[in-house]
Image (spheres, helix red, strand yellow):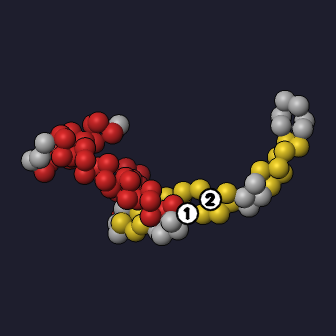
Amino acid sequence: MNKQQLIEIIAEENEITKDMATRTLNTMIRSIMTSVKNGEPVVLVGFGTFRQVKRKARVICNPHTGEKLELKPRSVPKFVPGTLFKQIVDEQNS
């Protein structure tokens, strides 16, 4: 499923226009990204948690040249699925 398909489902299930669904989804995505950027986890009970994790500096080796490069520390987003989400995905194996 892509973003446009998700917008169509939101619009249909909530009896709103696609424009309203687009604005709603964009607001949600932007809010999650802003909160995570600011170090605030976003917890959607049953769905999961979006949070920021810190990656340490490390040395890597360029596979083509063998040159060693140092990667600086950085922050990256992480999503941890909630229990209900994991159960729904795993239902096919039950």
User: Three-letter amino acid code at disc 2?
Assistant: Ser
**Measured along the vertical axis of the image, is residue 16 above or below residue 75?**
above
Q: Is residue 63 visible?
A: yes
The image position of residue 85, as x and y in percent, is 37, 59
**Measured along the vertical axis of the image, is residue 74 above or below residue 41?**
above
Number of numbered discs present?
2
**What residue sits right under mark 1 in the picture?**
52
Say which residue appears at 84% left-offset and 29% top-offset: 64
Say which residue appears at 25% left-offset and 44% top-offset: 22
**Quadrant assignment, res 31:** bottom left
The image position of residue 50, as x and y in percent, is 46, 62
Give how far apart the Cα atoms at labels 1 and 2 are: 6 Å
Left or right of 21? Residue 47 is right
Tell me the quarter of the image containing the C terminus: bottom left
Tell me the quarter of the image containing the N terminus: top left
The image position of residue 15, as x and y in percent, is 9, 47
Q: Residues at badges 1 and 2 in contact (C-beta under 8 Å)? A: yes
Mark nearer the N terminus (1 vs 2): 1
Q: Residue furthest top?
A: 64
- Which label is found at residue 75? 2
